[in-house]
Image (cartoon, rainbow, N blue to C red):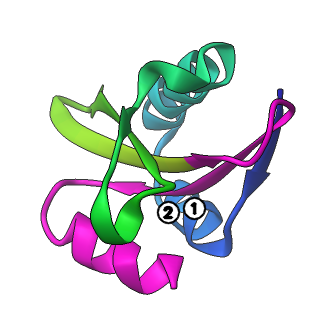
Amino acid sequence: MKLLVTASFVRATKKLHKPQKAELDSAVLAISTDPEIGESKVGDLFRVRIYKFWLSNQLCLLAYRVLDDDYLKLLTFGSHENFYRDLKKLDN
C-alpha cells in the first residue's frame, strides 16, 4: 500500500516528539494493513474515513481517503476539538 500525504499532515507531524511519532506510525501501519479499519463518514465527508487512536493519553482522529487498491491519502490528524470543521475546509 502506497501512502500519499497532504501538507497539513506533514505540518502536524513536525510538531510531534519521537514517542508520539512512534504512536502515529503504528496507527498509519494499522491503516495501511487494513484500510477498512476506519469509520466511513457520510454527508459532506462521504469519501473520508476516520481512524481513532491514542496519542500521549489523548484520543486523536486520523482522517484518510482510500483512492484505490494501491493508494491511501493521509489527510490530517488531531484531537476531536474542531477536527471535522477543519477537515471540511481542507477537503474542499
Circles 2 and 1, Cβ within 8 Å, touching? The answer is yes
Label 1: how many Cα within 10 Å (few below 14, some 14–19, many 20+): some
Which residue does the numbered mark 1 point to in the structure image?
9
The front one of 46 and 12 is 46
The total of numbered circles placed on residues is 2
The front one of 50 and 8 is 50
Q: Which segment is the magenta one?
A: 65-92
Left or right: residue 14 versus residue 57 is right
Residue at image position (56%, 72%) is 8
- Above-or-below relation of 88 to 29: below
- Above-or-below relation of 92 to 58: below
Label 2: how many Cα within 10 Å (few below 14, some 14–19, many 20+): few
The image quarter containing residue 58 is top left
Left or right: residue 84 versus residue 25 is left
Q: Amino acid at mark 1?
A: Phe
Q: Amino acid at mark 2?
A: Ala
Per the image, is 6 magenta? no
Residue at image position (74%, 48%) is 67
State the image coordinates of residue 40 (x, y, percent, origin top left): 38, 40
Left or right: residue 8 versus residue 67 is left
State the image coordinates of residue 63 (x, y, percent, origin top left): 45, 51
State the image coordinates of residue 32 (x, y, percent, origin top left): 67, 24
Per the image, is 70 magenta? yes
Quarter of the picture holding the N terminus: top right
The image quarter containing residue 28 is top right
- For the residues labelled 2 and 1, the Cα–Cα distance comes to 5 Å
Q: Which mark is residue 12?
A: 2
Q: Which mark is residue 46?
A: none
